[in-house]
Amino acid sequence: MGASVPRRGPGPPDGGWGWAVLGACFVITGFAYGFPKAVSVFFRALMRDFGAGYSDTAWVSSIMLAMLYGTGPVSSILVTRFGCRPVMLVGGLLASAGMILASFATRLLELYLTAGVLTGLGLALNFQPSLIMLGLYFERRRPLANGLAAAGSPVFLSALSPLGQLLLERFGWRGGFLLLGGLLLHCCACGAVMRPPPGSDPRPRRDSAGDAPGEAEADCEGLRLREEAPSGGRARRRLLDVAVCTDRAFAVYAVTKFLMALGLFVPAILLVNYAKDAGVPDSEAAFLLSIVGFVDIVARPACGALAGLARLRPHVAYLFSLALMANGLTDLSSARARSYSALVAFCIAFGLSYGMVGALQFEVLMAAVGAPRFPSALGLVLLLEAVAVLIGPPSAGRLVDALKNYEIIFYLAGSEVALAGVFMAVATKCCQRCSQDAPASPGAEGGASDTEDAEAEVDSEPLPTSTEKPGDLEALEVLSPGTAPSELEGEAEPGLDSESV
């Protein structure tokens, strides 16, 4: 490659083997988001055996989620270096080993290191590569694909929660952890499905300067990040593109996700124990998470299809902020729910808004930064989210231990999520006004004049030599100060060579 212009390949197929990749991503997403919440059904047994409180046991799910998010940059680097398939295979083994080892734990610290750190790391090494691969296989149908993949979370949550309660009753928490560890081996099968997209060269090559791309490019998977020199000189590989942090659209999204993560997962993690303390039988309390899952199953694909409509796709950031505000208001209005019927009503409303958030969050990020920078942007956002997740549920558990009252937890969590939605809408509007007030560059004048042209550019991908800026959304139409006209000109050309991402 070197001084030569990189070869452009065909665009994402939007089908074919991509449907198998979508199915694997469905399973991985289900484990990644459903598993940490489903583990909460074992908390009461852990509290009894280890003499711990809510805050101590809540750390198991929080550490698992924090590892899932916090190791995002590490996952990005590993995927760039080795490709999706080997990273996911190793991740499946780690996730399974963590739960199996946790079944032999005799102290809470051992649970934190096994079920928390090891299983969380394994899920992280599966979750992010599956999303990246999904983006390589789908372009025109990407909102629908993201919605269908995100539906794995409620499906698995509605199945894993009753399954966990059943395993707890028959085999105890140790036997339940052991069997769940075996179930996580399915992540390895999903990793095996992640073959390179069409148009990739399965053979390793040397460029004109004598550089060997290595096995990561041999397995392709379109994930070796490269930055071309402005003069067309030798390519320079970047494992993690931290320059995306200077993008205003990315900064708005990152702050929104941090505020959202502080409170979004708290009600779901504490819901089962909240219901049990309110006098609800154990089996019915565990079924509440299944209700959330059943509603979520319908909400995510429906919202993904809705976001793909021509009139709504340019405004998907506002739709995302609306979902966040709805979720926050649901928490606030249900803070005093104590009867089982009131808790069921809360679960229905929460599942609907939670599903909307899950279906839109990664579509908004990809539209803001573009496919080439999506792996790095996703890793950095997940790192910020990990900090929030590590703060949120344990702090809520400590408040429950101190106050013996769940009401303040719902008020606090709902306020944080609603604030995230308000911030997203206001900041996006301000960024849009700033971009309109700024003098238009020659390359940007042609595509933002009407809705149809902007919608036609949503799915277009840049040349490998360009850095895609957030022009995909009318609401996130913000350009970085260093954007060159030559970079903008490449946005209108469709297709993306998988080996150049």
Image (cartoon, rainbow, N blue to C red):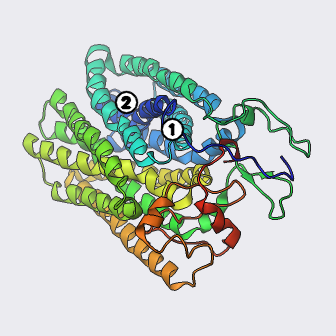
Residue that label 1 marks: 127
- Residue 308 visible: yes
Label 1: how many Cα within 10 Å (few below 14, some 14–19, many 20+): many
Q: Work out whether residue 476 or residue 273 is closer to the camera in this orientation and state it.
A: 476
Q: Outermost residue toward the right?
A: 209
Vertical relation: 390 (above or below) 466? above
Residue 308 percent coordinates (x, y)? 37, 52
Vertical relation: 427 (above or below) 179? below
Left or right: residue 487 compared with residue 182: right
Residue 88 percent coordinates (x, y)? 58, 30
Residue sitting at x 43%, y 78%: 430
Left or right: residue 58 compared with residue 239: left
Q: Work out whether residue 104 or residue 168 is closer to the camera in this orientation and state it.
A: 168
Residue sitting at x 24%, y 48%: 352
Which type of secondary structure does the marked residue at label 2 adopt? helix
Residue 26 percent coordinates (x, y)? 42, 33
Residue that label 2 marks: 50
Amino acid beneath label 1: Phe
Vertical relation: 265 (above or below) 214? below
Which type of secondary structure does the marked residue at label 1 adopt? helix
Left or right: residue 171 compared with residue 94: left
- Residue 43 visible: no
Residue sitting at x 67%, y 39%: 78
Amino acid beneath label 2: Phe
Q: CA distance from mark 1 to mark 2?
A: 31 Å
